[in-house]
Amino acid sequence: MYWYLQVIRYNYANFSGRARRKEYWMFVLVQVIIFIIVMMYASLVDDFFDTPVVGSVLGVYILATLIPWLALNVRRLHDIGKSGGYIFINLIPIIGRIWYIVLVATEGEYGANYYGPDPKGDPFDEIDDIGDSELEF
């Protein structure tokens, strides 16, 4: 839930920078769980009150989370060194979606790239700091 709230609160419309795989997949997991809960709740309300609520409830939720979802996808693509335009690969039937899943599942580039610093931290910074400390005996 932390990663979901991180995307919604702090990176709502942030299309610059990079997003880790963990941030992306945790957001997707929570989205799927929320979709299932909303669908179950709305179908119960539909049966009880005999009114079509599913479409309106899901429509509002999808509109509310569309911009953060797009921003997260663009930042995830930035992490692997790709432009945000690669999101349009999803428009290619079947093969495009599979290719996109492979892209977002790929480990990000180590260190800084054109789109910003490594969200995991630069592993080489630690190596540079090893000889800098003064030892006292």
Image (tube, rainbow, N blue to C red):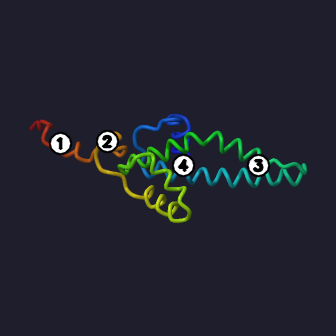
User: Along the line of sight, which residue is nearer the eye, 36 or 105?
Assistant: 105
Identify which amino acid the numbered label 1 is placed on.
Asp
Question: Could you tell me how far apart the alpha carbons at marks 3 and 4 are, in whole angstroms?
Answer: 22 Å
User: Could you say where residue 62 lies in the image, as x and y percent from the top left?
Assistant: 66, 45
* Amino acid type assigned to the residue bearing label 2 in the image: Tyr
Which of discs 2 and 1 lies nearer the camera? The answer is: 2
At label 4, which amino acid type do we have? Phe
Three-letter amino acid code at disc 3? Gly
Pointer 1 or 4: first along the chain: 4
Tell me the crowding category of disc 1: few under 14, some 14 to 19, or many 20 or more residues within 10 angstroms, Cα based: few
Which mark sits nearer the N-terminus, 3 or 2?
3
Q: Which residue is mark 4?
A: 27
Badge 4 local density, few (<14 within 10 Å), some, or many (20+)?
A: many
Query: Closest to the observer: 133 or 103?
Result: 103
| Mark 1 element type | helix
Q: How many marks?
A: 4
Q: Are marks 3 and 4 in contact (CB under 8 Å)?
A: no
Nearer to us of marks 2 and 4 is 2
Residue 93, given in percent of the width and then of the height, sits at: 56, 62
| Residue found at x 22% / y 46% | 124
Left or right: 95 in relation to 134: right
Q: Nearer the viewer, mark 3 or mark 4?
A: 3
User: Are the residues flagged by discs 2 and 4 in contact, CB closer than 8 Å?
Assistant: no
Spatial CA distance of label 2 from label 1 is: 22 Å
- Give me the disc on residue 128: 1
Q: Helix, strand, or loop for circle 2?
A: loop
The percent coordinates of residue 98 (x first, y second) are 50, 63
Q: Residues within 10 Å of mark 2 (few under 14, many from 20)?
A: few
Q: Which residue is mark 2?
A: 114
